[in-house]
Image (cartoon, grey):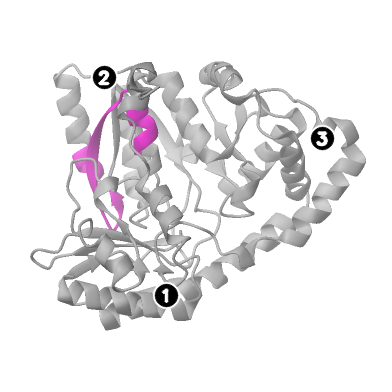
Amino acid sequence: MNSYEKFLSSLAKNIKASEIRELLAVIRTKKDVISLAGGLPDPQTFPKEIIAKMAEKVVAEYGDYSLQYSETKGIYEVRETLAKFLKDIRGFETSPDDLLITTGSQQALYLISRTLIDPGDVVITENPSYLAALGAFKMCGANIVGVKIDEHGMKTDLLEETVKRLVSEGKKIKFIYVIPVSQNPAGTTMSSERKKHLIEIANKYDLLVLEDDPYSYFVYEEGVDVTAIKALDTEDRVIYISTISKILAPGLRIGWIASPKHLSRKLELVKQYLDLHSPTLNQYILAEILKTSLIKEHVRKLAPFYKVKRDTMLKAIEEYFPDDIWYTKPIGGLFVFVYVNVPGFNAVKLLNTAVEKYKVAYVPGKSFHTDGSGENSMRLNFSYPPPEMIEEGIRRLGELIKNKG
């Protein structure tokens, strides 16, 4: 048989690879390349002893239950414990019945997309926005409309203008997707005024808000408002998703959705046909950790650890990059986003040169943009490399930018 093309669905024929996942696969084979590309947490932060201890405790105490199939929505005890954690840490109440445990937050994004989006529906996002979220929305047929951001997050005055225009054109807007704290890729954080305005817009135009919140549990600056949009929601419009990937370990693959009551059952039914349920053992491990003070103690260590790396990158950018750039100074998260305003600079075209000649990797920013712009931008990760490698990587990138190849 020469070709399987005729057997492929239209989705499979048109789907594109994630630039980040493909790039990481290439970089792993090049040991001499400094990678500022992926969003990998530093393995030094993984609480391996705690997880090992809790895994042993779970298998010993829960026995067969910990290794058996469980309900699609997630083990009730786990959802109950998680609801208490969210009230304590993120300041909003949700019923265990309205929590759905997912296999990482990426599954949460896909579940919500499959549940809400029909081909041709509009999804409004920040511009730029999280690449894997854009991919999930597009896979389900969404037309994505981006709203520009600045250092205070999504510009909600532009958001309202955009909503008005789309409504006047008869477009069907399904939801507004935002990462309000330490946005990926830009690292920006929404001001409290804009969060309130966002909710006002959603209420006024009868829209849903999808809040993606992986980074708010630890931030690097004092006095920054990291209030969840879900905590401001008075009309049950906000679908909240998060994950333990950045605060414990991504390999556990546990995320969650806190949804409005009338959406919970539909999300559960869609998940039934994706994976039956998320890993039982990992759910119990999470619950046991959340029952103790261990998670709070661990999270408190993350901010000072990653702040050193962030500050190293920002200082190196100041020293080694030319003046014709604009970059974010994130209060949390794992990334700095850079726009290079040097004529002719194209981060997409220069990536291979960066890897092969300068032995440094980044993620080109174009794919994060909803309107085809951003060829002159790049996302830089500071969480994974040690500080000395961050500085050297930025120095090499500075040479690439100055020489444009």
Q: CA distance from mark 3 to mark 2?
A: 42 Å
Per the rendered image, the range of residues in magenta is: 134-159
Q: Is residue 38 left or right of residue 248?
A: left
Residue 107 shows which numbered tag? none
Q: Earlier in the sequence, mark 3 or mark 2?
A: 3
Which quadrant of the view contains residue 167? top left
**Residue drawn at the location 65% of the way across and 25% of the way down:** 73
Percent coordinates x, y for residue 323 in the rendering? 17, 76
Q: Amino acid at mark 1?
A: Ile
Quick one: quadrant of the C terminus? bottom left
Residue 389 appears in the rendering: yes
Q: Amino acid at mark 3?
A: Ser
Classed neighbour count for the residue bearing mark 3: other residues with Cα under 10 Å, few (<14), some (14–19), many (≥20): many
Percent coordinates x, y for residue 337 in the rendering? 31, 61
Q: Earlier in the sequence, mark 1 or mark 2?
A: 2
Residue 120 shows which numbered tag? 2
Q: Are marks 3 and 1 in contact (CB under 8 Å)?
A: no
Compared with 397, 40 (above or below) is above
Q: Nearer the viewer, residue 258 or 21?
A: 21
**Residue drawn at the location 32% of the way across and 26% of the way down:** 13
Callout 1: SS: helix
Q: Are marks 1 and 2 in contact (CB under 8 Å)?
A: no
From the image, tell me which residue sits under label 3. 66
Quick one: quadrant of the N terminus? top left
Compared with 1, 250 (above or below) is below
From the image, tell me which residue sits under label 1. 390
Q: CA distance from mark 3 to mark 1?
A: 41 Å
Q: Amino acid at mark 2?
A: Gly
Percent coordinates x, y for residue 310 in the rendering? 43, 71
From the image, state whether disc 1 or disc 2 is nearer to you: 1
Classed neighbour count for the residue bearing mark 1: other residues with Cα under 10 Å, few (<14), some (14–19), many (≥20): many
Compared with 53, 386 (above or below) is below
